[in-house]
Image: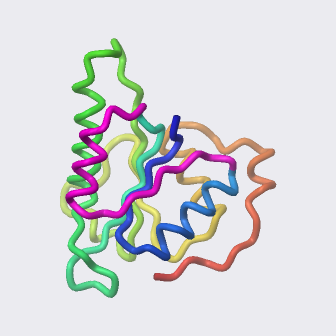
């Protein structure tokens, strides 16, 4: 089972974020943000992750590819809700990564959603992951977040 599904089109950022999460003992499936790969992931019958992390990089920004992270997240959430094999679908926590919170758009954030502004460190990433699943970060884990330089894209 995957704890975190990470979708980001920027290969260096994707690897760095995945490394931070794996350092915390989380199982990560990292994917590019391309529409074809997102559709392929949606088509697979994967056990649902507890957390979906999607980068939002508007077209025209420094690393922008025009990815609509909220649309990708909505598709994954709909896939879980539409699943007939569970009476109560596992809630999906969603964390958006991006340079500016304004990329979220006029609809804002829904329940179990958070925005993490770049640059960020491992501690902020860990707190965000636990917040979107409605749990406090365990104390033993808080001590494991090591000092890393802030991630810049």
Q: Nearer the viewer, residue 110 or 48?
A: 48
Horizontal side of residue 141 vs 76, given as left or right: right
Q: Position of residue 74 (x, y in %)?
A: 24, 45
Q: Nearer the viewer, residue 101 or 75?
A: 75
Q: Residue at x 60, y 53 (%)?
A: 127
Magenta stretch containing residue 31, yes or no?
Answer: yes
Residue 18's x, y, as percent? 55, 60
What residue is drawn where x is 48% and y is 38%? Answer: 50
Q: Residue furthest top?
A: 87
**Residue at the location (52% across, 34% down)?**
1
* Left or right: 138 as drawn, with respect to 71: right
**Residue segment shown in magenta:** 25-47
Q: Going by the image, does 60 lie left or right of 44?
A: left
Magenta stretch encompasses residue 132:
no
When the figure is inspected, residue 112 is found, relative to residue 144, above or below; the finding is above
Please report the residue visible at 22 percent of the width from the left and 26 percent of the height from the top.
Answer: 82
Vertical arrangement, residue 38 with respect to residue 34, above or below: above
Q: Position of residue 76 (x, y in %)?
A: 28, 42
Q: Is residue 126 above or below residue 75?
A: below
Indicate the colouring scheme: rainbow
Residue 140 relative to residue 56: left or right: right
Q: As displayed, is residue 46 above or below residue 113?
A: above
Q: Dividing the picture into quarters, in which one does residue 43 lie?
A: top left
Q: Nearer the viewer, residue 143 or 107?
A: 143
Residue 23 at x, y = what percent? 69, 57
Count of numbered circles on the image:
0
């Amino acid at each position: 089972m995957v704890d975190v599904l990470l979708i980001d089109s920027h290969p260096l950022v994707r690897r760095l974020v995945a490394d931070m999460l794996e350092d915390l003992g989380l199982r990560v499936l990292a994917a590019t943000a391309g529409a074809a790969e997102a559709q392929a992931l949606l088509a697979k019958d994967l056990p649902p992750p507890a957390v979906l992390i999607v980068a939002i990089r508007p077209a025209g920004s420094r690393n922008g590819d025009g990815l609509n992270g909220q649309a990708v997240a909505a598709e994954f959430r709909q896939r879980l809700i539409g699943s007939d094999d569970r009476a109560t679908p596992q809630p999906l926590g969603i964390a958006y990564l991006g340079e500016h919170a304004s990329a979220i758009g006029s609809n804002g954030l829904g329940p179990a959603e958070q925005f993490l502004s770049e640059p960020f460190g491992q501690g902020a990433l860990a707190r965000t992951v636990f917040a979107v699943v409605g749990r406090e970060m365990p104390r033993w884990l808080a001590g494991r977040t090591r000092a890393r330089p802030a991630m810049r894209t």
